[in-house]
Image (tube, coloured by chain):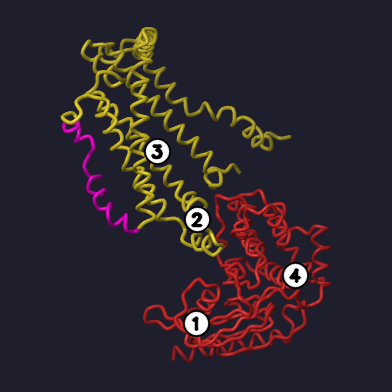
Chain colours: A yellow, B red
Amino acid sequence: MSLVESLPRLRKLRLPRADGLVPWLVPLLIILIWQAASALGLVPARVLPAPSDVAVAGWKLLRSGELARNIWVSFWRAGIGFVIGGGIGFAFGLANGLSELSSKLTDTTLQMVRNIPHLALIPLVILWFGIDETAKLFLVALGVFFPVYINTLHGIRTVDPQLIEMGRIYGMSDAELFARVIFPGALPSIFVGIRFALGIMWLTLIVAETIAAASGLGYMAMQAREFMQIDVVVLSILIYAALGKLADSASRLLERLTLSWHPAFQKH
Amino acid sequence: MQEALRFNALDEPVTREGIIKQAKVLRRTQGSSGRGLSLTIQGLHKSFGDHQVLRGVDLHIAAGQFVAIVGRSGCGKSTLLRLIAGLEKIDSGSITFGETARREDVRVMFQEPRLLPWARVRANVEVGLGRERKSPDALARARQALVEVGLADKRGQWPTVLSGGQKQRVALARALVGNPRVLAFDEPLGALDALTRISMQRLLEQVWRDQGFTAILVTHDVSEAVALADRVLVIEDGRIARDIDVDARRPRQRGSADLAALEGSILSELLRGGDERSA
C-alpha cells in the first residue's frame, strides 16, 4: 500500500486519541513560556509570580482548608443565584412566548429593566441588603435572568408554525403540543441563553464578591491584595477561569445529551 | 410491468422482497376495499381579506375515488384542500362527508414533510395515531405503516439523516397509520427530484389501492394528475372550470398516447385561461 493511500486511514486512527488533548495545548504552552520568563527574570515576581509559586500558594491554601471553603461558598452563590434567576427568566420566557396577553403586559417593562447594567445596582443592593448573602444572590439572579428570558422567548416564538399546525391536525392537546413540539423546538435557543447566562453569572459574582463580601473567591483575592500576596491574587483569577470552563463544559454536555437529534451534534 | 420495476429501481436499491411486493401490487385488481368516504361540497366560498379565493365550488366526490385538482398557482386549489381538511374556516357553503366523519378520518400530507426533527422515525409515525398513540398496538401499527412505505429499516433513525423522498415517505406513513378514510395531498411531491417523484407517485397509487381511502391530490403537475387520478378537476378563478374523467386502465403506462393527449388538452386550456386573464 502506498503512503498516499494509507494517509486517510492513519488520520482516522490518530485523531480520536489526540482530540481531547489538542484544546489544552495552547494553555499549556502559555504556562511553559510564563514559567520560563519568570525563571529567566524577564518578569519580576512582584508583577507576576511564576506558575510554580502560584501552585505553591494554592497548595498552602488548600491544606489550610481556606481554598476549598471559599470555592464552595462562591460555587454555592453562583448555583443558587443561577437557579433562581434562570428559573424566573425561563418562566417569563415561556409565559410571554405562549401568551399574547402576558407578553403585552410584561415585555416592555422587562426590556426597559434589561437596559440597566445590573452591576450599576451594586450601591443600591449594598444599601438594601448590606454585604449579606442576599445581595450576591440578588445580583447573580438579576444578571442571569435576561439572557435566559430573551433566548427562551426567542426559541418559543421561532418554533416552525408548520410543525404546530401538523401537531394540531393530529389531535395533540395543548399540553402535548408544548411537550412534543414547542419545548423541543425552543431548546437549542434556550441552551444559547444558558451559556450566555453562565458567563454573566461568574462575572457578576466576581464583582459582587470583590466589592461586598466576607467570604468567597473574590473576597480571597481582595484580602490577598491587602497583604500584597500577588500569588494568591493570580491563583484566584486562574480558579475563575477553570470554574468558567467547567460550567461551559457542563452545559455543552447537557446540550449534547438533549439535542442528539440536532444535525450539529450528530457524528457522520 | 418491466417498466414499473425499472422506475422503482432508480430510487432505491432493488431487493428481492421489493420485487415480490411490487409484483403483488401490480397483480392486484383495480378497486378498493371500500373504506373511503364520499364527499359533497356545495356553494363553497372563501376570501382572505378582500381577495376572493373560492367563488362557489360545487363538487361531489365518490367514496374511494382518486381526484386530482390542478390549476395555476393562486387559483385556490390549495385553499380548497385546506377547507376540506378543516384547516381553514368556511365563509359560506358546506362540505359534508358521506357518513359522519371523525376528525381522524381526514388526513393531510403537505409539500413539506413536517416531521419532528427531535423524534425518531418511528415516533414520528406514531404521531399519526393521535389519541390512540398510547394504545398497546401503537408500536406494531407504526412498524406496519413503515413497511408499507418501504422504510422498515429506518425506524430508529433521526429524520435529519433521511433524503427528501424518504422524509416524504415517513410523512406518508404517519398519514396512513391512523387508517384515514380521506387523504388530502397538497403538492406532496413538489419538492422532490423527477425520479424520486415518479417512484413516489407509484407508492401513492399503491397505498391508495391497498387501503381504499378517498384521495384528493392538489398538484400543478398535469402529467402527475393524469397518471394517478380517476378524475381531474381544473380550477380557474375560484371555480371548477373542467371536470374530466380519466378512465385509463391501471397500472397506467406513463407516456401512453391517450394520457399524453389528455395532458396536452388540459395544459393548453390552463395556458389559454391564464393568457386571457393577463390580456
| Nearer to us: label 1 or label 2 | 2
Point out the tag, 1 or 4, that comes first from the N-terminus. Answer: 1
Name the residue that disc number 3 marks.
A195
- Residue A121 magenta: yes
Looking at the rendered structure, the number of numbered marks drawn on it comes to 4
- Please state which of residues A71 and B5 is positioned toward the viewer in this rendering: A71
Q: Percent from the top left, x then y, of residue B181?
A: 66, 72
**Which quadrant of the structure image shows residue B138?**
bottom right
Whether discs 1 and 4 lie on one chain: the answer is yes
The span shown in magenta is A100-125
Quadrant showing the C terminus of chain A: top right
Residue drawn at x 68%, y 73% as measured from the top left: B213
Q: Percent from the top left, x then y, of residue A61?
A: 35, 10
Which mark is drawn over residue B75? Answer: 1
Name the residue that disc number 4 marks.
B210
Whether tag 4 and tag 3 are in contact, CB under 8 A, the answer is no
Tag 2: Cα neighbours inside 10 Å, few (<14), some, or many (≥20)? Answer: some
Quadrant showing the N terminus of chain A: top right
Which mark is drawn over residue A177? Answer: 2
Q: Percent from the top left, x then y, of residue B71?
A: 55, 82
